[in-house]
Amino acid sequence: MARDLVFYGFSGAPEPTGTVERDNSFLLTAHTLQLHLKQRFPGDSVDVVCAWHKDTFVNTLRAPGEKIRQIHYVGHGAGGGLYFGYHNPVATASRQTIINFLGRQTSGWFAQPGRKRLLALLWDAGLMSGFFSDALTSTKLAEIRAQLLPGALMHVWGCFAGAPTHTFDTSDPYWDLFNAGGASVEGIARHLARTLQIDTTACRDPGGVHGMDFCHRTGKGRLNCTDQRPGRLPHWLWPESRKVRWITHDPTGAGDETTINFLGTRIPATRIPPGRPPDWLLAEIPVATARATVPPVPKCSAARTGT
């Protein structure tokens, strides 16, 4: 027995309190992945986890239990981070609190190089490149690695995360902290691969323009990739343009765009072309699933709990 964990973040749909989700597309995509994983690994426990803050992600990985075979993240991404609390009012207010605090710190402990970045990496709801190497303690990182099976996989289902490098906004003092004093940092998928020492698959557009869109199956069994989002299974998040490429970063950080670790099997990238999920993947989920009820929506929070 092993565990597979499918995390999903906040959609960013407008909602004033930050406690209610108005768009369940990420949840539906996560439950669709759960169906795929149960087919591949019928003896595994496959858990769908709502994570509107990276602390939930990190602490779930640290928790003792059955060894982890695969980790999936469904949510907003960018070249340098996974944005678990994207546009969530609670996460946004918390970020503004730390921005205001850091803006007042001009001497003492915070005057030392890297200290403001360290606090931002720990505090922000997003998981930024550098977190596992420079912010999380080595003991806690070792706890996560100890939970991973040999050959474990992380797969990011979100835009732009596969970029080898990323430059955060240098015109904004807060976001520039994440550049660590340099011109750029390694991309978030590459960072995950190197620090967790596992293959990490994501997508990238070298031009930084195109990302991923939702596809769903209608009640009549037709695939619709017009980014409509009805509240029912199944949903897939898929590269939207021929310019978007899958990439798998190995534990050394080397990226491969020709052979992709996809749901635990290394396959040619040509078998998973952009535009729409391939027929062989769609066939894994019965058409009747499109008439199934929506999975229950759990309570979730974007509040920081600490790692």
Image (cartoon, grey):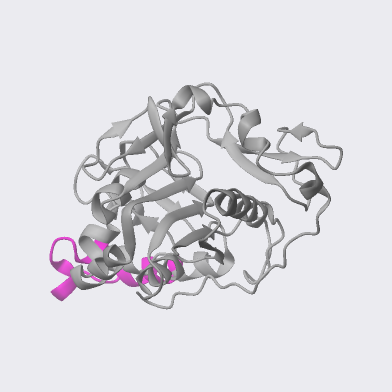
Q: Is residue 31 magenta?
A: no
Q: Can residue 48 be seen from the camera position used here? A: yes
Q: Where is residue 47 in the image (x, y as percent from the top left)?
A: 55, 65
Which residue appears farthest toward the bottom when viewing the image?
305
106 and 139: which is toward the camera? 139
Query: Residue at 63% across / 42% down in the picture?
Result: 236
Which residue appears farthest toward the right when viewing the image?
220
Q: Quadrant of residue 183?
A: top left
Per the picture, the main secondary structure of the magenta-coloured stretch is helix
Q: Does the magenta stretch include residue 99?
A: yes
Left or right for 10, reference 198: right
Query: Residue at 65% across / 29% down in the picture?
Result: 279
Q: What stretch is highlighted in magenta?
A: 95-118
Query: Residue at 74% across / 44% down in the picture?
Result: 286
Q: Quadrant of residue 61?
A: bottom left
User: Against 5, is 197 above or below?
Assistant: above
Q: Where is residue 176 in the image (x, y as percent from the top left)?
A: 30, 50
Q: Position of residue 137 (x, y in %)?
A: 22, 70
